[in-house]
């Protein structure tokens, strides 16, 4: 057990809040003004982790918070010590530990597979294929409706992520190489998938308060960068928002996408490994 004196853990908590404020504060302001951001709002609406929860700081296991740390006893898994409080995974409810075991099995299986880089981000195109209205109505389609449909028809769909595939249009689903389902998620997930990389943020906060908040922030920061590529490679025109397209309808665009995709998979690997360690502590090996 590593002891953090009160001034140290209060400083870490403040620095964490300041770090994530670059995303939480503008999101709250947009929400207050009724504005939408097609790139960044996704990380708060789809994942459903409120800004206040992202700002909340937890030290993770193996750390004793010395001094006046009684406020942490409000959260599950914390217990008092002789000189403060600490997080003890044994104090979590069985349902939380069961969830951690699922996360552990998924992350281990994903980490054990090679990255596949041949999807070229066409999942976003498949979500508007032959649709009457696009998902992001406020954004124009770069190639128009006919051109967008032509790209989907001309390129194979190789989506492996259930939570992307389930938003495919009815016309696009038969075009995908496989039919990923929730039941076979552990069998299908692979580290090259942008959505699997973004989901590291989801697993980080699902494991909280066992996850050190600095690790949650690392996963969120990576998810922001991945989401930007996700939308730059989409059929939408986001140039007015400062996001030039990655034109995956061209050979050059597909090569750029695969290069960036591989870089994100490499960045995700150590974060996934750290989350596996947290899931092992909570759910058991």
Image (cartoon, grey):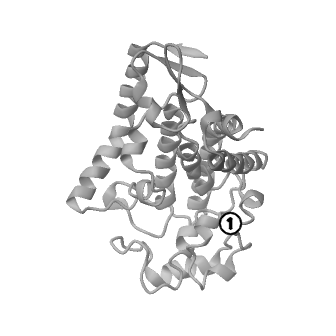
Quick one: label 1, few (<14), some, or many (20+) residues within 10 Å?
few
Residue position marked by numbered label 1 in the rendering: 182
Is residue 156 visible in the rendered structure shown here? Answer: yes
Image quarter in which the C terminus is found: top right
Q: Looking at this view, is 83 or 253 the one in front?
A: 83
Q: Is residue 122 left or right of residue 43?
A: right
The residue most toward the left is 33
Is residue 249 visible in the rendered structure shown here? Answer: no
Q: Is residue 247 left or right of residue 144?
A: right
Image quarter in which the N terminus is found: top right
Q: Looking at this view, is 119 or 93 the one in front?
A: 93
Residue 125 placement (x, y as % from top left): 53, 72
- Residue 75 vertical position relative to residue 68 in the rendered view, above or below: below
Q: Which residue appears at 75% of the width and 64% of the height?
A: 184
Residue 230 placement (x, y as % from top left): 51, 58
Residue 144, image quadrant: bottom left
Q: Which residue appears at 65% of the width and 34% of the height?
A: 90
- Residue 189 vertical position relative to residue 183 in the rendered view, above or below: above
Q: Which residue appears at 71% of the width and 45% of the height?
A: 104
Residue 25 placement (x, y as % from top left): 29, 44
Residue 263, image quadrant: top right
């Amino acid at each position: 057990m590593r002891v953090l004196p009160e001034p140290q853990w209060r400083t870490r908590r403040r620095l964490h809040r300041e770090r994530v404020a670059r995303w939480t504060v503008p999101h709250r302001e947009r929400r207050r003004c009724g504005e939408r951001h097609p790139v960044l709002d996704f990380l708060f609406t789809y994942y459903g982790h409120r800004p206040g929860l992202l700002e909340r700081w937890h030290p993770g296991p193996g750390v004793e918070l010395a001094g006046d740390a009684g406020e942490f006893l409000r959260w599950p898994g914390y217990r008092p010590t002789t000189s403060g409080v600490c997080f003890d995974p044994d104090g979590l409810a069985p349902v939380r530990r069961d969830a951690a075991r699922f996360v552990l099995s998924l992350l281990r299986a994903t980490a054990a597979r090679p990255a596949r880089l041949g999807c070229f981000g066409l999942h976003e195109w498949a979500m508007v294929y032959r649709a009457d209205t696009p998902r992001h109505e406020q954004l124009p389609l770069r190639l128009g409706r006919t051109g967008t449909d032509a790209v989907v028809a001309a390129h194979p769909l190789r989506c492996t992520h259930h939570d992307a595939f389930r938003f495919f249009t009815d016309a696009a689903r038969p075009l995908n190489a496989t039919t990923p389902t929730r039941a076979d998620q552990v069998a299908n997930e692979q580290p090259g998938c942008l959505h699997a990389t973004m989901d590291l943020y989801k697993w980080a906060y699902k494991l909280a308060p066992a996850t050190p908040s600095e690790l949650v922030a690392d996963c969120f920061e990576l998810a922001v960068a991945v989401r930007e590529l996700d939308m730059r490679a989409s059929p939408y025109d986001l140039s007015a928002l400062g996001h030039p397209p990655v034109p995956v309808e061209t050979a050059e665009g597909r090569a750029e996408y695969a290069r960036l995709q591989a870089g994100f998979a490499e960045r995700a690997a150590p974060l996934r490994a750290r989350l596996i360690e947290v899931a092992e502590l909570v759910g058991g090996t």
